[in-house]
Image: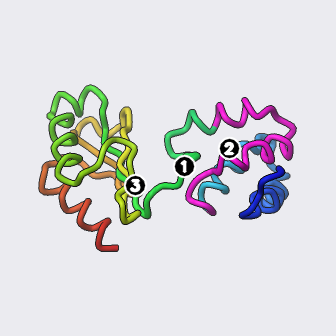
Amino acid sequence: MTDDPRGWAARVRVIVAGQESKPDRLLPVLRAMQQEFGHVPREAVAEIATALNLSRAEVHGTLSFYQDLSEEPRGRHVLRLCRAEACQAMGAAGLAEAALARHGLAWGETAADGSLTVEPAYCLGLCSCSPSALFDEEPVGRLDAATLDRLFAGAAAS
């Protein structure tokens, strides 16, 4: 990598070296990068590809496939609101749109203070408690406006 002001290349090499015993290292490397930096920097994709002897397309394809991986920095907290059929049938669309409007956010945006990123999810497997969400990977079922407002407020307070 030619433009590496934050030292991605060095960190990629260390992370890849720590995964050498695993036969399929790409996903563990991407997850380790996500864990360390809060995202997988676009600048690091070429270095990851080189280190794992993969094409940049293979790395990017995997990175873009998994919802929990991101090329963009996220907020300190991530709220994923389910958009699948069961949740939609229970009013999730209106609930989500109203909450986003109240808090001045759109899908995929991060609050100006960096506290919260709101993302769509397509089935969280919580259909029996819909509408549902994940807040920092913790499931939240039977969402209502008050619960969503508490999640937004809790993110802003921490």
Residue displayed at 40% across by 61% down? 77
Residue 32 percent coordinates (x, y): 66, 56
- Magenta stretch, residue numbers: 36-62
Residue displayed at 22% across by 42% down? 96
Residue on which the image places disc 2: 27
Do tag 1 and tag 3 residues touch (Cβ < 8 Å)? no
Cα distance, mark 1 to mark 3? 13 Å
Residue displayed at 72% across by 30% down? 57
Q: Earlier in the sequence, mark 2 or mark 1?
A: 2
Cα distance, mark 3 to mark 2? 20 Å
Of the two numbered discs 1 and 3 in the rendering, the one whose residue sits closer to the viewer: 1
Query: Mark 2, residues whose alpha carbon is within 10 Å: few (<14), some, or many (≥20)?
Result: some
Residue 154 percent coordinates (x, y): 27, 67
Give me the disc on residue 72. Answer: 1
Q: Earlier in the sequence, mark 3 or mark 2?
A: 2
At label 1, the amino acid type is Glu
Residue farthest bottom in this picture: 158
In the rendered view, tell whether residue 72 sits above or below residue 126: below
At label 2, the amino acid type is Leu
Residue 21 percent coordinates (x, y): 84, 52
Of the two numbered discs 3 and 2 in the rendering, the one whose residue sits closer to the viewer: 3
Do tag 3 and tag 2 residues touch (Cβ < 8 Å)? no
At label 3, the amino acid type is Val
Where disc 3 sits, the SS reads strand
Q: Quadrant of residue 149?
A: bottom left
